[in-house]
Image (cartoon, rainbow, N blue to C red):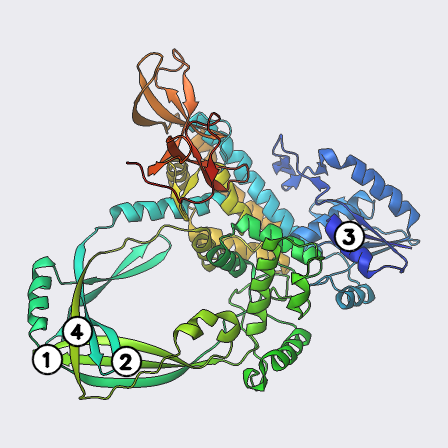
Amino acid sequence: MALIIVESPTKARTFNRILKGKDYFVFATFGHIRDLPKNKIAIDYKKQFKPGYQIIANKYKVVTELKRLAEKNTEIILATDLDREGEAISYHIAYLLGLVEENWPESVLKVPKKMSLKRIVFHEITTNALMEALKNPQELRMNLVKAQQARRILDRIVGYELSPLLWKTMGKKWLSAGRVQTVALRLVVEREKEIKAFKLEKYFQIYGLFNKESVEFKAKLIKKDDVAYEETIKLSLFDGNYQYTKNKIDNGLSEAISNDLNQDKYKISAVKEDITPRYPPPPLITSSLQQDAFNKLGFSSRMTMKLAQNLYEQGLITYHRTDSFNLSTQFVFKARDYILEKYGKEYVPEKPRGFKTKSKNAQEAHEAIRPTKLNYEFVTKKETKLTHNHKRLYQLIFNRAVSTQMKEASVKTVKIDVLSNKNYLFQSEWHQVMFDGFLKLLNPDFVKNHQTAISLNADDPIVLKNINSEELETRPPPRYTEASLIKSLEEKEIGRPSTYAPIVSLIQDKNYIEKEMRYFKPTKLGEAISDYLSQSFSQLFDLNFTAEMENSLDKIANNEKDMIQLLTEFYTPFEKILEEKKAENKTIDVEEEIDEKCPRCQGKLVVRYSKFGKFLGCANYPTCKFTKPFLKFVVGQICPKDGGRLTVRFTKSRKRFYGCENWPKCDYSAWKLNFQKKE
């Protein structure tokens, strides 16, 4: 009998279902079983950054059972996930079984002749994929292990060396810094500064409602005497460029133009029709899955990855930590057959469609995220062990993957110019779906709303029905959402697929940023940490430096760079700056004063931070030790039960909800605001 070792019990159950009746025993380690200890840095700088790994405290029983099973089986098969983290888990399993000789920084496989150690790699947990992997086993991919160890050591050095510096500077021993985490925080903080610095300007946009027989359309005023009203302004931001438009029409000019237009006559000056193909977007990868799930389903990145992990382990989707757009040939041809049967031959393109991966260093997972079976109906059955959210995410993945192999859509764009006798020029755009193609599956609402044809000719007279002047204001760069922050991290090549969700979650859990509706806003604590670290360690928390470090880790994985060389090049300048900062006696206060007095001593109340979040305390501490919870009230909303003010609260998993200020006397709570306004 062969012993197959996986990380997850769900994965083990799927393996057992597939291998039922065959001579295999599947054992789950429940994740990592060996790691760096939490209570010390455990990196020996004098011995080439040697890490001091140890068995995780609650995994001794797992290791004992693992060793017992290994003694009974002469064939050990490591079947952990195919990325660097999975490879590292396999490595530590092999080490604890005495099958690896560790001689840092090198490790050598040392398998007795009577035993066999195999590593299998697969992109999906299906019968075909698993049996194919068992027929073609590999050895441990030590370069991937080295890349994972290098990242682990780098992150441990930054976290464990900088965090005490933060404790000293800010007087809070629960703060933490991180190599990538702090850069993500800095993106949010710098964006908030750019928003505050943005000059808001009011302007007016004029629209005309025009009619010709049964045709009615809205058009925007763009020119007068061939001089444009609108101007485009470009700003250089921390993470790239921001472009916005502003109209030159103010209130007085708006009234004058509107009066002038009401006394004018109009005709169609030009009609330009253009039929263009619209191609389906590429299949989902980790970052786009998190963005799509946030934008369309309202899922946090953490929730998305948890659901995706479960779908993968149940054999329903391919591996979900990937930055590759590749799709297997087998899936592509099955998708074409599915489309032919369900939608008809007109929806099948002449040739299969492929997509070029954007990332220069697309990692080990060589396929995009896709369903393992082209039968969506089975997921909707009641007997499947899937929640409603599992099914929603699965449908998102299913539709996106299948749509990549559907015929492109054909959309007619009609651009209409309306010219007045006084030389005012209006412009409108009309869209009509000529052939829905992939939109039939991916965006049926767009198809439904763009069916009507429009028939207009140049020089046709047209009637102005109404003039509408809208007062608008220039918009600053938008705050980040989870989706846009992950998109920015991906575009800047900061972090990797497996790191996006933990990073975004961590800076929220630490109260460095908070959500206002869907958008991230830094707390005063987050701003202080970002400013201090980015000024003190300007190179370390630079976007380009962080991206280059990711590229260097990829080079280690590809056997193009030496791990110790990378660590030395990083640590030598870092250590010098660190010692300089340790010698400083700088302190930073992040308390926020509010307009409320302490009920005990009448001193000022201030907002303070703990590892549990914000709270209110007396400014006269330690003389006065009064504290109370910090409640964020919802302006204009009252509790429908007792009339108290509604407050923003969070569950243990950081999901936002609304509750009454008089809790626990009043237990009212709701996920959404849908209440009467306060009189």
The one nearer the camera, 676 or 627, is 676
Residue 297 visible in the snapshot? yes
Separation of residues labelled 3 and 2 (CA atoms): 58 Å
Residue 41 falls in which quadrant of the image?
A: top right
Q: Residues within 10 Å of mark 3 (few under 14, many from 20)?
A: many
Circle 1 residue: 265
| Comes first in the chain, label 3 or label 2 | 3
The one nearer the camera, 528 or 446, is 446
Q: What residue type is labelled 4?
A: Lys
Q: Residues within 10 Å of mark 1 (few under 14, many from 20)?
A: some
Q: Horizontally, is 663 left or right of 72 in the view?
A: left
| Comes first in the chain, label 2 or label 4 | 2
Residue 415 numbered tag: 2
Circle 3 residue: 12
The one nearer the camera, 474 or 119, is 474
Separation of residues labelled 3 and 4 (CA atoms): 68 Å
Circle 4 residue: 465
Q: Which amino acid does label 2 sit on?
A: Lys
| Comes first in the chain, label 4 or label 1 | 1
